[in-house]
Amino acid sequence: MRSELNLNCVASNVSHSHQPNSPKLRRFYTPLYANVATTAKRAYSALDGIIRATNTLLAGKVFTVVGYGWCGRGLAMRAKGHGAKVFVTEIDPVRALEAAMDGYEVRSLVEIVS
């Protein structure tokens, strides 16, 4: 029996060598595309675009941020501002410590998925 985890992924300015629409990668997640030039002019975040496209509220929901770089930090802040419970997964111990000091719960991806 084979189990699959279907996730949504926001792809922004993806290079041709890492196309999220490839058949091998597509079975793991559904790609959502964002045009950075259009959203930057209107000062929308990627999270705002996802909320508007899916018509969902984040208040009280669990939101996982994979990687706590500049983009992940912004997503975590916005999700927390919308009232979601935010978990951060990070393999770099320094960034994991930064996430913990910023008030996010840091866990491994295996713990969050199970």
Image: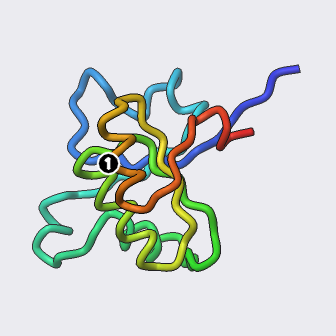
Q: Is residue 54 left or right of residue 113?
A: left
State the image quarter where residue 58 is shown: bottom right
Q: Relative to the observer, which residue lies in front, 32 or 81?
A: 81
Amino acid of disc 1: Glu
For the residue carrying disc 1, how many other residues have a C-alpha within 10 Å: few (<14), some (14-19), or many (20+)?
some
Quadrant occupied by the N terminus: top right
Which quarter of the figure has residue 19? top left
Residues 77 and 33: in front is 77
Farthest right residue in view: 1
The image quarter containing residue 62 is bottom right
Q: Looking at the image, which residue is at 58% across and 36% down? A: 109
Q: Above or below — where is 22 with respect to 57?
A: above
Residue 100 percent across, percent down from the top left: 42, 52
Using the image as rendered, state which of residue 7 and residue 111 is in the foreground: 111
Residue at the image position 16 percent from the left and 78 percent from the top:
42
Mark 1 lies on residue: 98
Coloration mode: rainbow
Vertical placement of residue 83 versus 25, above or below: below
Q: 62 left or right of 22?
A: right
| Place of residue 29 in the rendered image (x, y in percent of width and height, measured from the top left) | 55, 39
